[in-house]
Amino acid sequence: MMLSLASLIIYDAFTLQRFKKLFPAKKDHWIFYIIAIAINVIISAAAYTLLDSRFAVYLVFMSFMLSFNFLFNGTPIQILYAGSIYTFSLYSSRGIIFSIYSIVLHTSIKDVLQQNNNIGMISALTVLLAILYFLLIRDVILPKQKARYLLSNQGQLKFVVIYLFFQWLFLTLINDGRYYDDIRQIWFSSLYLGSCIISNLWLLVILNHASRISELFEYELFTHQLQEQLSRQMRHYQSYRKFTESYRAFRHDYEKLMASLKTLLRRKEYKKAIRMLDDIHDTMQQSVMIHKNYSDNMILDSILQDAAGVCEEKNIRFSAHAYLPESVPMADLDIVRVFSNIINNAIEACNKVSDSERFIEVTSNSTPYWAIIEVTNSFNGELLIVGGEPETTKEDKDFHGFGLRIIRETIEGLGGLVFIEPDREKRIFRIKGCIPKNPRSKAAKTV
């Protein structure tokens, strides 16, 4: 009994440490992990002691989801995935070990279960096999980045969870055959062994397929963002070209105008000179396009220039001044991924409120170690929080709602922080990105 409990504790600790790298934590102190493991071990031990094993396994499934939800933030489908893959791996590994014991000892699985001296060793071997299976998934099928792609793709994750449930149900139905004495037990043990192995192999195929589709979806999303940014930059360059052409045309007449103005001043015809200055000012306002700069960074400025144009069309008050120091280690693509999503989300939120309330404000601040950019916008006060994060309210959730995740992953990948501060009463949504500066960039310039 003690060896079985120790094995389950090891399996829980290993699994939770794996999920810790994939999900944002609610509680990160080691004492909370001990509490979560204790909850699952106590409920699991009580379930297998008091209930039939056919029903106890479902209680174990719910118990682990409870422990997972205690430690991590996750959507309902992510919580179901965590619980189902935990239980399926343990249940199928247990089936493989029991079947091998039965075949080697030339006895039935039912008799193996009744031999208490074997239970501890079987539990230890079950956990060892389940951990090896998890390692195979982690290192070969679902490395960290692929796993994140899959976990963020709700459609593919649902597909995996449905598969796990059906395979789990399939194995439990086959496992019931051990209670029928008229079945040849060696044949049944071989059938059960084969079913467990095939189910695990098919899970690897399913995970690989789902992760590849999720990865391709990420690339498609990324490509779409690049195309949008190229369009923004083209509009930015065209706007700047028009400004340059209008300024060049004004400059062409500038010298003649100045010569005429000097002549009037020498003759002391001040009223005519003033009228000419007024005409020059009016001509400049009408002919020379005013080119606003919203940022010192060309990529970020083009994003904000485009946003200003969209806001003007949609009657959204827009103001922006975003200083992004050169010492911030953000690649151009990172700037596109972060700020395009922030601005797009802000514009979508403003579309849901009346014209008089619509506004977007972009501000920046800088400390010796951090560059801070804050975007504030109006919204309708309705916010869906799932797993501690705002979630899209659009019907097609499988293809929307990636914005905040991309923002968080990109900034946190640079060692930064993201703060989301919605105020439902004032109906103001604020997102703040704190990006660390790279002191080596200054040193490199001085060398």
Image (tube, grey):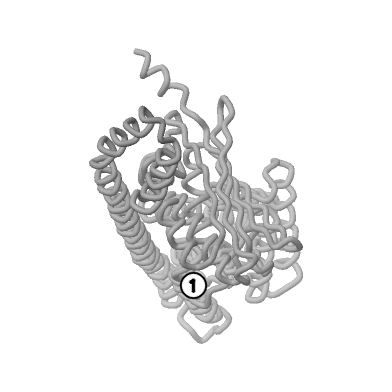
Q: Which residue is mark 1?
A: 158
Q: Quadrant of the C terminus?
A: top left
**Rendered position, 337 above or below 391:** above
Element on which disc 1 rests: helix
Q: Residue at left 60%, top 51%? A: 431
User: x%, y% of residue 423?
Assistant: 71, 58
- How far across and how far down the image is residue 124, in percent? 57, 51
- Residue 277 vs 133, above or below: the answer is above
* Left or right, 58 with reference to 235: right
Relative vertical location of residue 244 with respect to residue 91 in this rendering, above or below: above
Q: Which residue: 55% across, 84% down?
A: 180
In which quarter of the view is residue 48 placed? bottom right
Dividing the picture into quadrants, the one containing residue 378 is bottom right
Q: Looking at the image, which is closer to me, 260 or 92?
A: 260
Q: Nearer the viewer, residue 325 or 386?
A: 325
Q: Nearer the viewer, residue 133 or 373?
A: 373
Query: Residue at coordinates 61% horizontally, 61% vertically from top-left?
Result: 390
- Residue 101 seen in this snapshot: no
Q: Amino acid at mark 1?
A: Lys
Q: Residue furthest top?
A: 447
Does residue 209 appear left or right of residue 360 in this picture? left
Instruction: Identify which residue, 407 or 153, lies in the foreground.
Output: 407
Residue 136: give x, y in percent of width and height: 40, 52
Query: Is residue 85 something that shows in the picture?
Result: yes
